[in-house]
Structures are given as C-alpha cells and as structure tokens.
Amino acid sequence: MPTKQELAELIRHACEKRGWGPTKLAREVSVAAGRPPNTIERQYARRWLNGERAPTHWLPYVVQVLDLDLAPTGEIQNAGSHAGATDTVASVIQLGRRDVHRRNFLAATSGYALSALALPDLDSITRRTKTAPAGAVRVGAGEVAAVQQMVKALGDAAAELGGGHARHLAVRYLTDDVAPWLNGKYTEATGRELFAATSQLVHLAGWMAQDEGNDPEHQGRAQQYYAHAYRLAAEARDPELSATALRGLAVQAIDLGFRAEAVQLGEACVRYGKDLDNARAVAYYEATLANAAAQDDDRRTATRHLTLSENAIGRSPATVGESWAAHYSPGRWAHESGMILTRLGDLDAAEEHLHLALDIHGLDRRRTRAIVLADLGSVRLRKGDLDGALATWGEFIDCADGIRSIKVRAAARDMRTRLNRFPDLPEAEHLRQKAGRLIT
C-alpha cells in the first residue's frame, strides 16, 4: 500500500490528467459512493491532494473514479530471505500490465533508485524449475532466441526514431508473449538465458518510457522497469546485464538531479563490470561513473574514471559481438566524453570529442546523431563561434525531423531559448521557427 504522500501524488496526477480540481473530485467520489454530490466538501478533497489526509473511508471510491492501481508492483525488497520477498517474474508482469492499461505510476524517487541495489533473489530460477505447474508451456532455445530478436528489432527502431515510437509494442510483447514463457517449464540453463533476454526487453521498455516523456509518470515507469531489469539480470547471474540495468538507473538519476545516488549507482556499475572481458562494456560503465561524478562537481573522480574509460575504449576491437554493450562504439564514447568535458569546463576538448563522434567515428542512428549535433551547437555558441553554432543547429533541425524523443525536444527548446539573444539575426529567427515546429 502506498504511503499517504505517495497516495496523494497518485491522486494529483490522475486528477491533472482529467483536468479535475478538488471540487470535481469531491463530487465524483460522493456520487460513486451512492451519496448526494455535495456529501464530501471541497476542502476535504483538497487535503487528499495535498497529502494532509488519506481518504481512508472513501479510498475504494477514489480508486474507482480515478482508475488507480495501488498494487505495490514497484517494490524492490531485500530478498536475502525468501519469505515475504517479491517474486520478480510476478512483479514485472504486473508492472507491464499496469502500463498496458495506463494505470497511474508513482514518480521516480532517489530512494527507489537506491533500493534496487538490495540483494536479489538468486535462487529464483532454480525454484521455478522445480515448481512449474503440470500444464505450463515448455520453453527452449527457440523462445529465448525470439525474445532476443524482438529486443533487437524494437531497439533498432527506438534508436532511430526515439523511445516514443512503438513503446507499447515492447510492453505488449512482455505481457502477452514473454509472460507465459517466464511462468513456463524450462531447465535452469534455459531459465538463465530467458531471464537475461527478458532483462534486455524490460530495460528497453524502461529506456523507451524515459525517452518518451519527461513527466513524473513516464520517469517513474522507466525507473521501475530499470529496477526490474536489474533483478532479472542478477537472478540470471549475468554481470554485464546487471551493470547495464544499473547504468540506466544511474543515467536517469543524473537527469533527475539525484547526484549522490547517481554516483553510488555508477560505482555499482563499475563493480559489476570490473571482471568482464569486454573493453566496450568497461568503457561504458567507467564513463557512467565519470559522468555522475562530473554532475556532482567531483572533478578528480570524474577525470580519473574518464581516463579509465578512454583506456578501455582504446582496447576495444573493431568488430563487435552480440554483447549488450556492443553498441557503445568509439563514436558514442566520444559523445559522452565530450559532454563530461563540457561539464568540467574544457570546451576545446569537448568540441574536439563531439567532432570525432560526428565526422570521424560516425554515428549510425538518427536520434543519436541529432542529439550530438545539438550538443555541438551549444558548445560552439559557448565558445563564441556563433556562425559555427548556427550551421550545426541547422543540421540538427533537419536530422531531428520526425523523431519522438524528449531529449531531442529538450535540445530544440534549449536551442530556441539560446537564440533569443539574437533577435535581429535572420538566421537565428529562422532556426527558432523551425525549432518551434519540432517541439510541437
């Protein structure tokens, strides 16, 4: 059951989506309870919205009129002893179903992000192999391969067009197709592969939700998916996937301003990845910690881990395998490093890295390329190169057309705001108008 403040947050979000104030809420709850419309006073409903009072007696009717789902699907409990621990499979399936039915989600919080680090249920797969019901569907390598192929197809589309494209397909695939397999009959080896593949699918759903909207519900939804992706990966005993899921939480914590939590999650990424024989993965996690430290204004730590990341990416082979971290190419590393250097105030090095990302290493995804162009334009403007900034932002606008991503929209808003400084410059006004169309 949510706390009083969490319940108030759910009620507020649901009312905001409907355009309801306390008067409308009080009236609808009164009617749902079979009472006269003015039974509940406006001030009483206002206390529910402000978290000053919980609607104890009226809660069933509040849930009914606002279509709330109070199931604690997002809880990440300490599973050191199995008694009372949350079953990851049941929890992630319920999470997906709440998403499909557009239930209200709690906002992302710093406490929830850190609670994901609680010890997972490492015996989950073994226990499931012994307790599968007689009529459960048999699962083998074919089902695991199907999940992996769907993750690749949906991930490729999202990387090209943004998380707002086809996110519902990823969630539907989880609840309609993968759920029966997770509850099916399989060997322990197959179970580990299935949990690992599902971790990738759940992580993708989280990334897509995070990229689709910057409102509390989208971010809360993304945070819960990331935490479940970590649990699935840890129960599959896959350190790379575990680290990658924690990286998702760390990057989101950076975006939300949870600086100390981002550093702690970044450190956990590095711990999980320290023994991996995968230079790209090591670079991925070291850069995550460097980024978190830079946002926390810890220049010494940021510089140290950025150097470790650079050393690792320099060792990465030209050809990559099927690793989940294989997409972290030298070009993507150059982009992330450029933004870390921007935060540290080294604009010359930042511009050089962003130039490397675009023109030397190349970027194969349109969404990524658009974001790098926007970042490069901002760096050039900060350096006083207005002509260079305008030219780069022009490329960004053309590249970003049709992409559904909050990062792209945020970059367009940032660009338009910065161009307000040049009201008499026709090129700037032209870009501002194009940016306005992109945002809407």
Image (cartoon, rainbow, N blue to C red):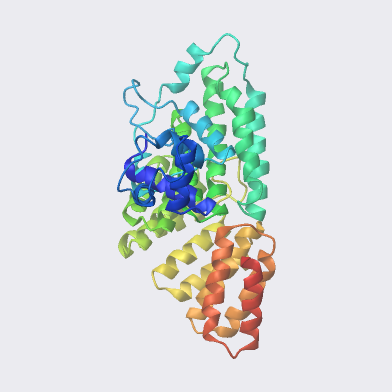
- Whether residue 113 is visible to the viewer of this picture, yes or no, is no
Residue at the extreme bottom = 424
Viewer-side residue, 39 vs 367: 39
Task: Look at the image and tell me in which quarter the C terminus lies.
Answer: bottom right
Residue at the extreme top = 134
Viewer-side residue, 333 vs 208: 208
Q: Position of residue 389 (x, y in %)?
A: 58, 79
Q: Residue at x 54, y 45 (%)?
A: 325
Viewer-side residue, 216 vs 318: 216
Q: Is residue 268 above or below residue 414?
A: above
Number of marks drawn: 0
Task: Look at the image and tell me in which quarter the N terminus lies.
Answer: top left
- In the image: residue 138, left or right of residue 61: right
Q: Residue at x 55, y 74 (%)?
A: 415
Q: Residue at x 44, y 55 (%)?
A: 287
Corner quadrant of residue 86: top left
- In the image: residue 430, left or right of residue 285: right
Q: Position of residue 205 (x, y in %)?
A: 56, 42
- In the image: residue 177, left or right of residue 27: right
- Whether residue 384 is visible to the viewer of this picture, yes or no, is yes
Q: Is residue 423 above or below residue 7?
A: below
Q: Position of residue 167 (x, y in %)?
A: 62, 45
Q: Is residue 196 above or below residue 367?
A: above
Q: Position of residue 403 (x, y in %)?
A: 66, 59
Corner quadrant of residue 295: bottom left
